[in-house]
Image: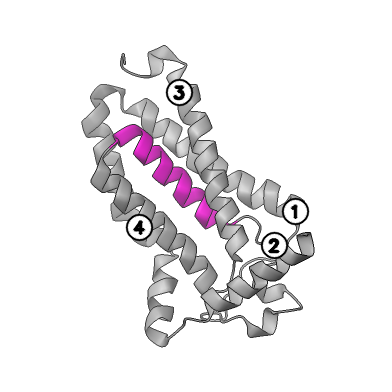
Amino acid sequence: MVDWLIHIDRELMLFLNGFHSPFFDFIMWWISDRFIWTPLYLLILVLFIRKFKSLAFWPILITLMAVAMSDFFSAHIIKEGIHRLRPTYDPVIGQLVHTVHGYTGGLYGFVSSHAANTFALATMSYLFIRSQPLTIFIFAWAIFVSYSRIYLGVHYPADVFCGALFGSLLALVLYFIWLKIPFLHPTR
């Protein structure tokens, strides 16, 4: 069963990674960059402050904790514990994977930290802001950033899916902990 899932993941990886062109190489390279999204992070910060006013510190802190914990656990605990090679290091398909600028990432890729972090931020933004336009945009953004990791050849679809699931669940847990501590939020 596990071998069949790995086979499907490899096939899906090669299929999704196969849609490349110089134009999309450029786009996906920049989509995957964390710092290009600084205006989005600032917008989310402003929305938190507008909604929570003097109590914004706590939702902002919880959100930062979700992203930081997501990054730490995905990069240092899960990847180092699972040891699943990235597609570019996979002896079966490594030579077939399209990369951009020769970037291959570190040796291990399960789970995708980009997917975990973007979905942690998207989930927290949804839970705290509760704005339909923001929710649609922020989850579309998280999906797009996550797909860019497959496009760039540094993650399997399962790495991305599990990273997204991990980041979202971590955010939910932290949000519900926040709800249980009354002095951290306005009365409901």
Please state which amino acid type lies under the numbered disc 4: Trp
Q: Earlier in the sequence, mark 2 or mark 4?
A: 4
Q: Which residue is mark 1?
A: 82
Q: Assess disc 2: are there few (<14), some (14-19) or many (≥20) residues with their C-alpha within 10 Å of its C-alpha.
A: many
Label 2 to label 3: alpha-carbon separation: 33 Å
Q: Secondary structure at mark 1?
A: helix
Q: Earlier in the sequence, mark 4 or mark 3?
A: 4
* Span highlighted in magenta in the image: 112-130
Please tell me which residue is depicted at 27% across the width and 46% down the height of the picture. 134
Please state which amino acid type lies under the numbered disc 3: Trp
Residue 37's disc is: 4
Please state which amino acid type lies under the numbered disc 1: Ile
Vertical order, 157 against 187 (above or below): below
114 falls in the magenta region: yes
Q: Is residue 64 left or right of residue 57?
A: right
Q: Is residue 102 left or right of residue 46?
A: right
Q: Position of residue 127 (x, y in %)?
A: 37, 34
Q: Is residue 104 visible?
A: no
